[in-house]
Image: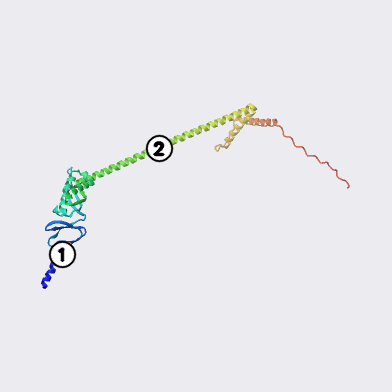
């Protein structure tokens, strides 16, 4: 009796283990009934028919990364390059991913490799090095369309590295160096040209300003000379009027004045140690005499001011004798 009870307990435990399944988060189990796919078990607790249902495949529904090994690819211009890539994908339909393809990972890797050769083989070396985004977009479109019957969504395809041959790398380095030297020389030439243009513009502006300054100075000098001539003419007119009204006396006055000023300049000169008067120096005395006569004549012509009256005299008082 005890052995039967133990047997029943063992059978019950086996049935419990075969009928109760717990699916982890991020996974989907395929349920097979008598070897045929019937449904997909989402994360959680599931009760199966004992001895009839069983778990077929455990499909990872999270986004996964598949590393594509390095490939040697011949480009359109017959250059051999090494390429590494990486593929990001996610299973959307567990039943298709489990039963539409035998080895999902190997199938995606082979499909990506062949399309990588096709896409990069249709481009030359310069395009493969400069158009990675275009290569990634073309690979994503092609591989995603090819894997859609498998219930898989290709989210991204990225080229990790492109390795050109060593001789091509050296030639590219020399080309880049020459291009940079060319750009440096062009920039230096443009800088020198701009500097010369600015210097020429500065010299031009300086010459213009200097010419304008000379013109303004000449204009002001001419104006000053004109005013000086006008003053000289006015003075000459005044002198002529004075000579006309006073005769030779005014003429002698002005000649004596100029002669005196000239002699004064000789005397005040710092280089003059000895002053020699000309023989005609007596003319100066005569001129001075003319000045005196002119002043005297002017004094006689002007009315003399009235003389003040003398104060009245007090009468004298005789001194008292014996008083």
Colouring scheme, one of rainbow, by chain, secondary structure, one colour: rainbow
Q: Is residue 147 visible?
A: no
Residue under the point 31% across and 42% down: 187
Which residue is depicted at the point 41% across and 37% down? 205
* Count of numbered marks: 2
Where in the figure is residue 138, as x and y percent of width and height? 20, 46
Residue 258 lies, in percent from the top left, at: 59, 32
Q: Earlier in the sequence, mark 2 or mark 1?
A: 1
- In the rendered image, which residue does mark 2 sit on? 203
Image height of 299 relative to 121, above or below: above
Taking 77 as reference, is 215 above or below it? above
Q: Is residue 132 above or below residue 226?
A: below
Q: Nearer the viewer, residue 121 or 275?
A: 121
Toward the viewer: 107 or 114?
A: 107
The residue most toward the bottom is 1
User: How far separated are the C-alphas under marks 2 and 1?
Assistant: 101 Å
Q: Nearer the viewer, mark 2 or mark 1?
A: 1
**SS type, badge 1:** helix
Dividing the picture into quadrants, the one containing residue 131 is top left
Residue 17 numbered mark, or none: 1
Q: How crowded is the residue under tag 1: few (<14 C-alpha within 10 Å), some, or many (20+)?
A: few
Task: Please identify the quadrant where the N terminus is shown.
Answer: bottom left
Residue 137 in sight in this render: yes
């Amino acid at each position: 009796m005890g052995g039967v009870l133990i047997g029943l307990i063992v059978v019950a435990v086996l049935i419990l283990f075969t009928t109760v399944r717990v699916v982890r988060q991020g996974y989907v189990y395929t349920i097979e009934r008598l070897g045929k796919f019937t449904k997909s078990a989402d994360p959680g607790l599931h009760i199966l028919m004992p001895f009839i249902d069983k778990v077929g495949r455990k499909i990872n529904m999270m986004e996964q990364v598949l590393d594509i090994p390095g490939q040697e690819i011949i480009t359109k211009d017959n250059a051999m390059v090494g390429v590494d890539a990486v593929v990001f994908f996610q299973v959307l339909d567990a039943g298709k991913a489990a039963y539409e393809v035998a080895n999902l990972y190997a199938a995606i890797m082979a499909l990506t490799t062949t399309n990588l050769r096709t896409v990069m083989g249709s481009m030359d070396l310069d395009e493969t090095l400069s158009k990675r985004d275009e290569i990634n977009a073309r690979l994503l479109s092609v591989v995603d369309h090819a894997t859609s019957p498998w219930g898989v969504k290709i989210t991204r395809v990225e080229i990790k590295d492109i390795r050109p041959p060593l001789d091509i790398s050296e030639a590219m380095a020399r080309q880049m160096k020459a291009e940079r030297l060319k750009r440096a020389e062009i920039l230096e030439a443009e800088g020198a040209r701009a500097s010369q243009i600015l210097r020429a513009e500065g010299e031009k502006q300086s010459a213009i300003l200097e010419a304008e300054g000379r013109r303004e100075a000449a204009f002001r000098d001419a104006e000053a000379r004109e005013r000086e001539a006008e003053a000289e003419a006015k003075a000459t007119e005044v002198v002529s009027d004075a000579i006309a009204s006073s005769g030779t006396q005014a003429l002698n006055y002005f000649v004596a004045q100029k002669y005196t000023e000239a002699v004064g300049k000789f005397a005040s000169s710092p280089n003059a140690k000895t002053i020699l008067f000309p023989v005609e120096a007596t003319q100066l005395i005569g001129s001075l005499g003319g000045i005196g006569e002119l002043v005297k004549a002017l004094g006689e012509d002007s009315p003399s001011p009235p003389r003040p009256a003398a104060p009245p005299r007090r009468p004298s008082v005789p001194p008292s004798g014996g008083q």
